[in-house]
Image: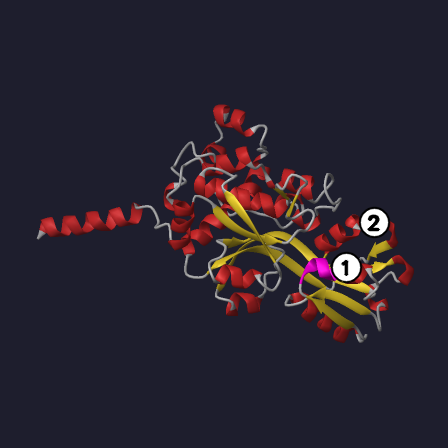
Amino acid sequence: MRTGLFVGLLAALLSLSAPAFAGATFEAVRQNGYVRCGVTSGVAGMARPDSRGRWIGLHADICRAIAAASLGDAEKVRFVPLTAQSRFTALQSGEVDVLVYITALTLSRDATLGLSQVVPYFYTGQGFLVRRSLNVSRATELDGATVCATQGSVIERNLADFAQRSRIRLTTIAYDTQPNVIAAFLSGRCDAISNDMISLSANRLSASDPDAFVLLPDLIAKEPQGALVRNGDAEWAVLVRWSVFALIQAEEFGLTQETVEATRASTTDPEIRRFLGLSENVGAGFGIRDDWAFQIVRQVGDYGTLYDRHVGIHGLGLDRGLNRLWNKGGLLMSWLWQ
C-alpha cells in the first residue's frame, strides 16, 4: 500500500514538472520548418516588401521574433499577405499560423471568430486623412462628406457611431483592399479616408505630394492592435504572447541587438540572467531552448529600437505616445519574467 502511494505521489510530481505539450500549431510549425505569418498586403511601417523583396516593418519583425523563439531562427518565417476580408478566414482555415496584422482587438472578434486575441503590441486610434483643399481642421467639420474605408473592418462601424454621436452625416464607400481605398481617395472618389493613424500616416507619406493632405488630430475610436491565433491551442498562444513580451522586456532591461551578447557574457543581474536563459530553465515549459528570449534580441532586437526604425524617428515619424514603456508614461508592459 505504501509502495502504491509513493508511486502515485511520484507520478503526480513528475506531471507538475513536465514541459507543457507544444500543441498542434507548434507541432505543425516544427514539421514545416517555418512560421506562416499573416500580414497586411503592404503598409509602410508595419509590413511590406522592400526593393529586394525582404519584408520590413514592425509586424514583420514581430513575426521574426516568433520564429526566433519557436525555431531558433528569425528568418524561418513565411509572410502571407492578406486582405482585411481574408485575414480571419486564413487563420481559421490553417493557411497561416498566426495573424500579425493591423487588427483592432474587439469584444465581437473575441466572442465569435473562434480565434484568440493573445497580446496587444501597438496602441493607436482611428482618425481621418483629408485633402488640404477641403479646408477642414476637425473631424466634426466633415458633415456631408464621403469617406473611403476598408470593407469588412471595424472602421465602418466606428464611422457610423461617430456620425451618430456627433450628429453629422457621413457617407461611407467601402473597398475590398487598402490599396483600392487609397486609389479611390487619390482619384477624388471620396473627401477623406478613415483608418488607424499608423496607416493614415503611411498613406500621406507615400503620396506624390504629402503636403496636399492633412491628418486631422481627432481620434474617433481607440484601437489596441494585437496578434491572433486559433482557439484551442493555448500553448501556441502563450508562445506568441511571450515572444512579444520578450521584445518589450528587452527594452526595459536596456538590451539591444548590439549589446545583448556582451551583457549575457558578463551580467550578474538575476532578472536579466533569467531572461537570457542563463538560469531557471525558462524555455522548458514551451519545449524550446532556454535562450529563446536571447535569440529574439540577438536576431531581431528590442521593441524601442524596432519602433524607432519603422514607425518613429527613422520611419514614419510618429511619436511613441501610448506605445512607450509603462515606466515612461505609456501602456507597454511585459508580464513578470519569473
Q: What stretch is highlighted in magenta?
A: 177-183
Q: Residue at x 71, y 72 (%)?
A: 161
Q: Which of marks 2 and 1 is nearer the N terminus?
A: 1
219 left or right of 136?
A: left
**Residue 135 visible in the displayed image:** no
x, y percent for residue 10: 20, 47
The chief SS type of the magenta part is: helix
**Residue 255 visible in the displayed image:** yes
Amino acid type of disc 2? Ser
x, y percent for residue 290: 41, 36
Residue that label 2 marks: 208
Secondary element at image label 2: loop
Q: Which colour scheme is used?
A: secondary structure
State whether residue 41 is above or below residue 282: below
| 239 in the magenta segment | no
x, y percent for residue 45: 68, 46
Please tell me in which quadrant of the rendered image residue 140 appears: bottom right
Residue that label 1 marks: 183
Residue nearest the viewer, comparing 117 with 320: 117
Whether pointer 2 and pointer 1 mark residues with C-beta atoms closer than 8 Å, the reply is no
x, y percent for residue 176: 67, 65
Mark linked to residue 20: none
Secondary element at image label 1: helix
156 left or right of 208?
A: left
